[in-house]
Every structure is written in structure tokens, then in C-alpha cells.
Amino acid sequence: MYQPLSNQQLIDVANEFGTPVYIYHAEKIAEQYNKLKDAFKNHPTRFFYACKALTNINILKYLKSLGASVDCVSIHEVQLALRAGFAPDDILYTPNCVDFNEIVEAQQLGVNINIDNISILEQFGNRFGSGYPVCIRINPHIEAGGNYKISTGHIDSKFGISIHQLRHIERVVKTTKLHVKGLHMHTGSEIKDVDVFLRGLDVMFEIARHFEQLEFIDMGSGFKVPYKEGDPETDVKTLGEKLTTAVKEFEAEYNRTLEVWFEPGKYLVSESGYFVVKANVIKQTPATVFVGVNSGFNHLIRPMFYDAYHRIANISNTNGAERIYTIVGNICETDTFAWDRVLNEVREGDFLAFYNAGAYGFEMSSNFNSRLKPAEVMVKDGKAFLIRERDTFDDLLRNQVEVL
Ligand SMILES: *Cc1c(COP(=O)(O)O)cnc(C)c1O
């Protein structure tokens, strides 16, 4: 049975590699991957890890060793995936609003390509015709997801080709003889309701009837993980059962096997991650008690950007009296990680752990305030490996050109 990292393990890593530090527990990634694999074992299903969530090359290699494929949103992610050892057929490139040349580059690398714009579809068809099968990203206009900023299926979204443009898609495909081998949708992040996926699947079947050469239907992602006590997690087991039944029924009508593809990001890596910081100062004001830590939204932007909730604990004083704190960063900008949290008494120098920090944590970090990006550590088989060094002062000047 899977055991999360203990406080002592987190403290040992913090002492060895310093803080702030991102720590990823490999076995948790394996547990999540195997849950998915198991839920869909009765139908050919492939999981493309949406690597924008966490792109460290060791995480990519580890997911490859588990049997995952990889979903990339930039040509550089494609290059990283190739570098990690993924075969081109195990890479899916899902770009949005990129230069056509970047798509041609992906074509030359031989990876699977998702096209999400009629104008690109037309250019691709004119250039490659039936010679390079592609997947089309459909916007099904299904409202879903935890937060408007992370919903991608709504009517105002820039993603995908609207289902209402199906007629136009068909025109382009027919005229250019494009070979459409897959249909894709991704309506957003943090969908807890299995029925949303099933509704999306029905829309995909509707469109699939217009194409004869499909090999797969890509349902994107949106798997939700619990961020706080009592939060639901997407019930992948039920989803697996219901989806398998629905796809098998459709296959009978379509007269072909259709693989199901998914692109989980957060589901695979979020809970594997811990972000450990140090309490620099305790500051009593007329309104609250602040804990000022040696980090900020330059390292973990999700609370400020998405109003995300991350559970936080004082791992240095677990028997201390419970008190109420506001946890803030050290940068010059309003920078609040959490209001009114009950923590065991925090003393200056204590380590605090942020949980669920694996997805969109380090990946969205910056050097704002000329602060250094944190180190990354992977714990595997009980051993801690440094997988990215903490930035140094030189990193701040790298690429700057001193002309004065
Ligand atoms: C970001 C993204 C995902 C992953 O979403 P999660 O919520 O992290 O699982 C999957 N597919 C595409 C196309 C994405 O852009």
C-alpha cells in the first residue's frame, strides 16, 4: 500500500538541499498512473501525460518507464519528450495559436498532431494532403472545470474548432484529402462529474459519424484530485466502466475499434509533489498573525492566480498548540498563500509543507523580484535525488547583454 512521504523525510530533504524546495514522490506518480490504467483495462486506452504540469526530464523518463505516452503543447516540450526517450508515435503535439512552421517542425519529427484551427487545417491539408494523418481538436462547448480561467470548452474559449464548424471541417478535409485519424476534446481542468466526460463522448460520437478513418477518440483531461479534506477525486473507476460500455456500443455501429486516449496532467503528478519552505518571520499586525516564508508567488503562483487552495502544515512542530495564521511570501507585491489557516504554532525557522504541489508548481515559477528558482528533488525507493539545482545568481544575468 502506498505511503505518503513522512514529515521526517521532508525535513531531511530540506536540510540536505535547502529551502524552498520542490519534492516529488515517484511512487505516488506510479500509484496514480496504475489507478488510471486499471480503470480502463477493458478497452484499448492510452494515457498521454500532459507534461506542461511538470516537465523535469526525470519525471518524463519515469512516466515513460511506467508505460505512459506524452502530450506536448510546445515544440520544445516535444523536443524534451524525444530527449527523454519517447518514440515519436508516443508523443502527441496539441498546440494552440502557434506559428504554422512549428507544426511543420512537429510533422518532420513524426509525432502525432492535434489541429485546433480551420486555417491551420487548410494549410496542413494543402501541404500534406493524405500523406500525414492528423487529429482534430473539437470544441464541444461543454461548460466544465473548476475555474473559468482553466475551462477551455466554453463559447468564449480560444481552444479547438467549434462543433458548429463541422461542415467547414468536412469541406477542408474533402478538398485536401486529409486523413483524419483522431478526434480530440479537452474541456478544462478539475472536472469531478463523470457525466461531463460522458456528455463529451456523445458529442464526439456525433462527429465521428462524419469521418471514416478514425483510429482513436482523445478525451483530453480534467481529472480532479482532492486539494483539501473532503474534496472529491474524479471517480476514474466508474468513468472507466461507463466509458468502456459506451465506446464498445459505438464501435459496433462504427465497425472499427476505436482506441480511447486521455491526457492527464494534474491527476498524475499533483499529489506526488510537496513544496517545503522556511518561516522567515512571524509578524503580528492589528488584524492577523502573518507567517512570512522564504518563497512567494514567484515559486508557487496557483493561490494568487487561480485562488487555489493548498493544504499547508508546520512539519517542524507537529505537537505545537494550534493557532491561526495568514501565510504570505517575501516578495514586494501582495503575495498571500493562504488566509486563516490553523497550524501548529509556527516559530521562526520552522519548515512548512505545501501539499499537492507537483502540478503547475515549479513549472509556473519565475525569477520575479530577482529571486532564485527553487531546487527540485525526486524521492524514489526511499532515496532522495537532486533533479534540478537551485538557481544561482549567475542565472539571473544569463542571457542579459550588458551594453552600458
Ligand atoms: C493542460 C492540458 C491537459 C492537462 O490538464 P490537467 O488538468 O492538468 O489534467 C491536457 N490536455 C491539454 C490539451 C492541455 O492543454
Image (cartoon, rainbow, N blue to C red):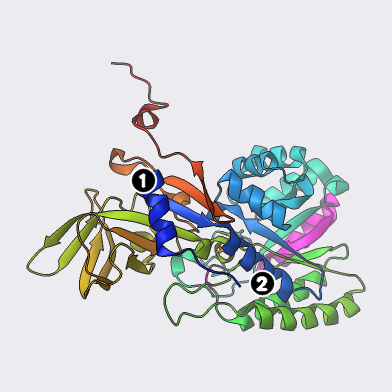
Residue shown at 63% from the left, 83% from the top = 195
Q: Is residue 48 magenta?
A: no
| Viewer can see residue 94 | no
Measure the alpha-carbon separation of dots 1 and 2: 33 Å
Describe residue 51's horizontal placement relative to residue 275 as left or right.
right
Image-quarter location of ligand 1: bottom right
Question: What's under tag 2, amino acid-wise?
Answer: Lys
Q: Quadrant of residue 49?
A: bottom right
Circle 1 SS class = loop
Q: Residues within 10 Å of mark 2 (few under 14, many from 20)?
A: some
Residue shown at 79% from the left, 44% from the top = 126
Percent from the top left, x then y, of residue 318? Answer: 30, 69
* Quarter containing the N terminus: bottom right
Describe residue 103's horizontal placement relative to residue 321 as left or right.
right
Q: Which residue is mark 2?
A: 35
Question: What's under tag 1, amino acid-wise?
Answer: Gly
| Viewer can see residue 132 | yes
Circle 2 SS class = helix
Q: Which residues are magenta?
A: 161-190
Q: Which mark is residue 18?
A: 1
* Quarter containing the C terminus: top left
